[in-house]
Amino acid sequence: MKASYFEKHGGPEVLQYGELPDPTPESNEILIDIHAASVNGADWKVRTNQYGRPIDFPYILGRDFSGIVSALGSEAADFKVGDEVFGVCENGQEGTYAEKIAMDQKLVALKPSNLSHLDAASLALIGLTAIVSIEDCLQLQKDEKILIQGGAGGVAGFAIQLAKHIGAYVITTTSATNSDYVKALGADEVIDYKTQDFTEMVSDCDAVFDTVGGDVAMRSFEVIKSGGRAAFIASGFKAPDSPRDDVQSLRPDAQRSRARMERVAELASNGVVKIPERQIFSLSQAQEAHRISEGRHLRGKLLFEIKE
Ligand SMILES: NC(=O)c1ccc[n+]([C@@H]2O[C@H](COP(=O)([O-])OP(=O)(O)OC[C@H]3O[C@@H](n4cnc5c(N)ncnc54)[C@H](OP(=O)(O)O)[C@@H]3O)[C@@H](O)[C@H]2O)c1
């Protein structure tokens, strides 16, 4: 199969495009012909070895996909050949920057017929992460006030729409260029982080969802009311230590499952969540896609169209 892969850690230039052996499904796995896959913020962090996790080379990146079932493991009976499915690889595994992947059937859901493969691939991991963060971890409620940091990114864009659907009041930060984009997603208030200090403009939030990390994450504690909570997805594997006794600091646990994929499918196919703005690449253009992702000013999603 054709794949984008790398044989040593490094900059975007280590990504190569070429032929690698086809995967073979284990008994509980299904083989999928991938039609579309997405680029996620974690991909360039794995490429540059930020997680320090040992990996076997050649290594194929990519966590989410949409495609068509092409073969079944001996005990995989949940789907049939020809089913259109989408999903997210198990935590700590990758491999969707490729024409094929074998994966556990329990991680995969049927793709809604009113979504294209590009649509489904663009939503899989960001949707899973936003659902886990907003619904399961923060347990956001109607009429609560939430600050979502980094509103123009993939996860935050999904989270804005989900928070509005729940009935919360949503404030988000972005640069001025993306202000109209996040308003169209439903944000009630937009703060231009380049010219405005959110700690001077926001207070008494019930919750904060931070997708930016670093100093932005730590300063977020200042705008939360007593008894409030904050969830962090860009500050490493653990939540930052809360500098306040009266505010919970949480790290969402984005466990993959078919049920969560079905929730993503439900929200998207019912129109609760729109398809993010996207830029589409071929697998041979992975270096270019990674340069944009690593620049950290992407609006929406980067996608690979692998098969039309
Ligand atoms: N833990 C998980 O399960 C999980 C899953 C997915 C993603 N993540 C992590 O979550 C983070 C977000 O990922 P993503 O793919 O959604 O988006 P992303 O591509 O990393 O985010 C880019 C966005 O961040 C905005 N941004 C950059 N600096 C900002 C600042 N100081 N204040 C406000 N906005 C700022 C940019 O907007 P402007 O251009 O307007 O600056 C851009 O729209 C990444 O670190 C990723 O690794 C974690």
Image: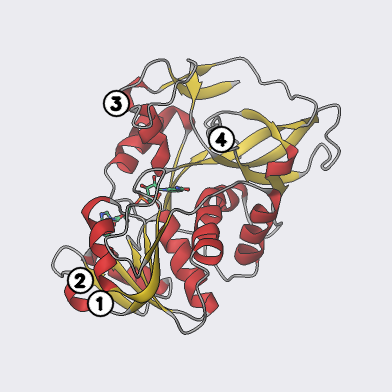
Which circle, 4 or 2, is nearer the viewer? 2
Q: Are marks 1 and 3 in contact (CB under 8 Å)?
A: no
Q: Judge the density around disc 1: few (<14), some (14-19), many (≥20) Cα neighbours within 10 Å.
A: some
**Local SS, label 2:** helix
- Residue type at mark 2 is Thr
Residue at (55% x, 66% y) in the render: 135
Residue at (59% x, 47% y) in the render: 255
Dot 1 or dot 4: first in sequence order is: 1
Q: Residue furthest bottom?
A: 143
Q: Judge the density around disc 4: few (<14), some (14-19), many (≥20) Cα neighbours within 10 Å.
A: many
Q: Judge the density around disc 3: few (<14), some (14-19), many (≥20) Cα neighbours within 10 Å.
A: some
| Residue 202 disc label | 1
3D distance between C-alphas at marks 3 and 4 = 23 Å
Foreground: 55 or 227? 227
3D distance between C-alphas at marks 1 and 2 = 6 Å
| Residue 306 disc label | 4
Dot 3 or dot 4: first in sequence order is: 3
- Residue type at mark 1 is Val
- Residue type at mark 3 is Gly
| Residue 199 disc label | 2
Foreground: 168 or 139? 139
3D distance between C-alphas at marks 2 and 3 = 35 Å
Image position, residue 243 (x, y; %): 26, 60
Q: Quadrant of residue 73?
A: top right
Q: Are marks 1 and 2 in contact (CB under 8 Å)?
A: yes
Query: As drawn, is 171 to the left or to the right of 84?
Result: left
Foreground: 273 or 259? 259
Which circle, 1 or 3, is nearer the viewer? 1
Dot 4 or dot 2: first in sequence order is: 2
In the displayed structure, 153 sits above or below 87; it is: below
Residue position marked by numbered label 3 in the rendering: 11
